[in-house]
Amino acid sequence: MNKWLQDKNSFGMLAKTLAGLEEILAGELHELGAKNIDLQNRAVSFTGDKALLYRANLSLRCALRVLKPIKENIYVQTSDALYEAIQEIDWSRYLDNNSTLAVDSFVFSNYFNHSKFVSLKVKDAIVDQFREKTGTRPSVDTQNPTLRINVHLAEDKLTIALDSSGDSLHRRGYRLEKNEAPLNEVLAAGLILTSGWDGQSTFIDPMCGSGTLLIEAAQIARNIPAGIIRKNYGFMTWQDYDKELWQRVRQKSQAGIHQNVPQIIGGDISPQALQITANNLERAKLNDSVELRQLALQKLAPPKDAGVVIMNPPYGERMKEEDIIDFYKMIGDMLKQNFTGYEAWILSANKEGLKHLGLRPAKKLAFKNGALDCKFHQFKMYKGSVKAKYQKNS
């Protein structure tokens, strides 16, 4: 019996996320009505019913996948023990002979060196069970399987889960075009929620690239579920898929969407980048929610009302050191001159660049952007110096 089982309709789930976004994700789950929320490393465990499983996939902005564990913390140290543990599961509850399956293994163990070997062993145990009982077996489809199985092996502790999301939830469906080094949608949403932006004041991304921050901000402001465009989720091919329940979940979520949106502005000097952003906005059906401006960064004149500016400037992998330092100095000067009253947040993997902004950060947070270690710095753009502000208020 699942250790989190509360009643016949409740079961344990695990939402995977990026490092640093666990608390934000836990807050999202609380808003959705999840129970027994527990923060883990790059994940949050919780309990709920099938409707919550559907809502989590549709609405969570900071989740990569939603897993449903079916066997947890099983002791295995050998390939035979792994095989036997998988064989003990009645896979006819989840598959039939005509089904397809895929196995994703995540191995952190001194007993098992290769994730591919673990995946192969798990697959063999499942198909052998069917072959012994029926004489035929399900086939493997790594792209669009009927059932995607998640295997987590930490030293000698094995957990088997069903992947209810299928494709990663960061693939919202609106970004078919992208420029160089695009920002992951889950990270973009997480940065916005981390900033504390209220969804009502002005939001600006002056270096919008392919528009990910702008689209995520507009969806947050209008209470649009993150996965509203997506057509397919892993749970839709499960044997217990409830299409009517899914339709009710979608309809209820859509009923909460509103048209009120603050001024959301995206700027970029590149006409190509702005065209990509415009195309992505059109797919997200947010053309009327975002204003685009083609101009140099230092020429962007924001609205007088206070708001939030978030930017993900180039990290300088292809620029000379002196050029990147000058570039970051220009960003700092632009913020000081043009963004009085705003909160500015900058994500960057370039430590030297951040040092040369000429601004004192109020907060320093750490995130991963792909394989890069990044800092997310907050700057409060007071009128005059910080010292003058405190003298005035003393």
Image (tube, rainbow, N blue to C red):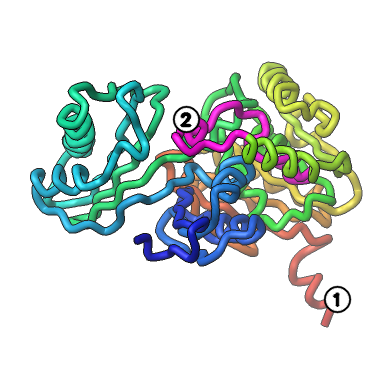
Quadrant assignment for the C terminus = bottom right
Measure the C-alpha gap from mark 1 to mark 2.
63 Å
Position of 349 with respect to 92 (left or right) is right
Q: Mark 1 is on which residue type?
A: Lys
User: Is 68 rendered above or below residue 205?
Assistant: below
Q: Secondary structure at mark 2?
A: helix
Residue linked to disc 1: 392
Q: Mark 2: which amino acid?
A: Thr
Q: Which residue lies most toward the bottom here?
A: 394
**Range of magenta residues:** 216-243
Residue 232 is a magenta residue:
yes
- Residue displayed at 66% across by 49% down: 192
The answer to whether residue 328 is left or right of residue 321 is: right
The residue where tag 2 is placed is: 237
**In x, y percent, where is residue 22?**
51, 57
Q: Secondary structure at mark 1?
A: helix
Q: Is the residue under label 2 in contact with that under label 1 (CB below 8 Å)?
A: no
| Residue 323 showing in the rendered view | no
